[in-house]
Amino acid sequence: MSFMLGREAEFYIKDEGTTPKPNFGNSSQLNYARASNAARVLSTSMDFQLSREDRVDTRRSRSLFERVTGKQTITWSVETNMLPRSGSDVPNISPLIENAMGQVSTTTYSLADSLKTCMMMRLIPGQLREELFGCWVEEMSISASGGDPVTMSFSGGAMEYALTGTGTTNATANSTTVTITGDAHQFQPGSRITIADQTSAPTHGNVVVGSNSDTTTIVGAAANYATGKAITPHTPANTYTVHGTPVTGISGTVNFGGAGVGVLNVTAIDLTLTNNIKELGDEFGEKGTSAFIPGFRSISGTVSVRGTSAALLQLTRRYKGLRPTIFESNGGLPVIEQPSLVVNFGQTSGSIQTLNIPVIEIDFAAIEIPESEEVVISLPFTALATSSNNEMTLAWNQTT
C-alpha cells in the first residue's frame, strides 16, 4: 500500500469549445497534452454528490428499508497564483478565464453573452485520476494585497465525473472487454487507464466506456493485454513543468479615473465576477445537468486604501449624489460619480496583466478608525456597462 500525497498531485485544464463534454466515454474523447494543458495550482476540489432520499410511503414498521436515487450534482473549485508565462501569450489556466468571461482575442479576455465549457483533471500518478467534463465557471475572483502573491480563484459545476483507481488484469486478450481481478468499479465511464506492457498501447491511454460486471471493464477500442498486469490511471506523456513566476502585490498600480485623484496607498484589491448560472438538472430522463443558462452577470470588488486626503476624495464621491441642493445647475438632481478603474498586476514588461473597468460606481462602507493605528478606507465598487458586455477586460502579458 502506498500513500497518496498532495504534493505529488498534477492538475490539467482543457477547453471543450462550444459543445460540452465532446465524445465523452468514447475512444475519441478529448485528451490532455502535458506541456500545454498542465497548470500549477494552489488547491483544487471536485465534489460529486448523488441524491439518495429516504422512501417515506406507508409501511407497518418504523424502520427505514429503502432509499430512492435522485439526481447527481458536481461542483468544483480551483485556486492558483497569477502566473504569466514567459515567452507565451496566455496562461495555462486560460480555459478557466475564458469560460468565466466569455471570449479571448490573442491576449485579451473580454465578456460575452454565451459561455463555453472546459474539462479538468487532477492526477496522482500511478494511483488516482479524477476528471470532470462539461465544466462551467460560475465565479472568478482576483485578490491582491501587500507583498503576497496575487491569486485567482474559480468555482462552478460540471456535467460528468470520472474517478479512476488501480487494478490488475485477470486474463490475456485482445478485446474491448478488460477482465479484472474484482473491483471493476475502480474504472468509471470517461476514465483513461494504462495497462502495463500493453501491445500497441494508445498514446493517451484506454478510454473506459463502462463496466458490465464487477470483474470486467469495457474500453472504447480493443486492448491487447496479458494477465497479471497492473492497471493504473493514465498519466500524460512528457514533463510536468513550472508555468510562470507568481506576480506579487509589491509590483503593480491601481488607477481611478477622473481629475484630481492623486496617489492612493492601496493595501488590497479584490474583484469577483459572478455569472449567476442556472443549471438545467431537472429534465426527465437525465441523471444530472445536461445544459446551463447564464443569468445576469455581476462584477464587484473592493479597493482598500490607507486614509489620506486623496483616498477621502474617492470616498466623498459617494456622498456627492446625496447633496442635491449643492448642485442647483443640475436642477437639484443627484449626480453620481462613475470613474474608471485600471489595475496593473506586475511591472515586468511582457508579464503585466491589466484589468480595465471603464465605469465603476463606488458603493458605501463605513470608515473604520482604530484606537491608534492608521485609518484604512474601503472603497467597494460595482462595475457598470456602457454597451453590451464592455464592463471589464483582462489583458494578459502586456508590455506596459
Image: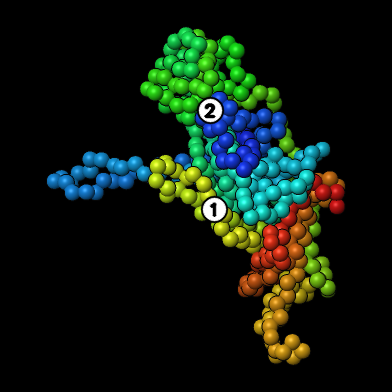
- For residue 134, say whether it is visible: yes
Q: How far apart are marks 1 and 2 (CA)?
A: 26 Å
Q: In which quarter of the image is residue 294?
A: bottom right
Give x and y (percent) for residue 11.
61, 35
Q: Residue at x 46, y 29 (%)?
A: 188
Residue located 51% across and 30% down the image? 25
Q: Give the residue at x 63% y 73%.
A: 364
Image position of 122 (left or right of 360): left
Residue 145 coordinates in the image, percent (x, y)? 70, 56
Q: Which mark is residue 389?
A: none
Name the kind of residue labelled 2 in the image: Asn
Vertical relation: 214 (above or below) 85: above
Tally of numbered tags: 2
Which residue is at the front of the view, 117 or 8?
A: 117
Residue under label 1: 293
Asked if labels 2 and 1 touch by Cβ distance under 8 angstroms, the answer is no
Q: What residue is pinned by disc 2?
A: 26
Q: Nearer the viewer, residue 79 or 200?
A: 200
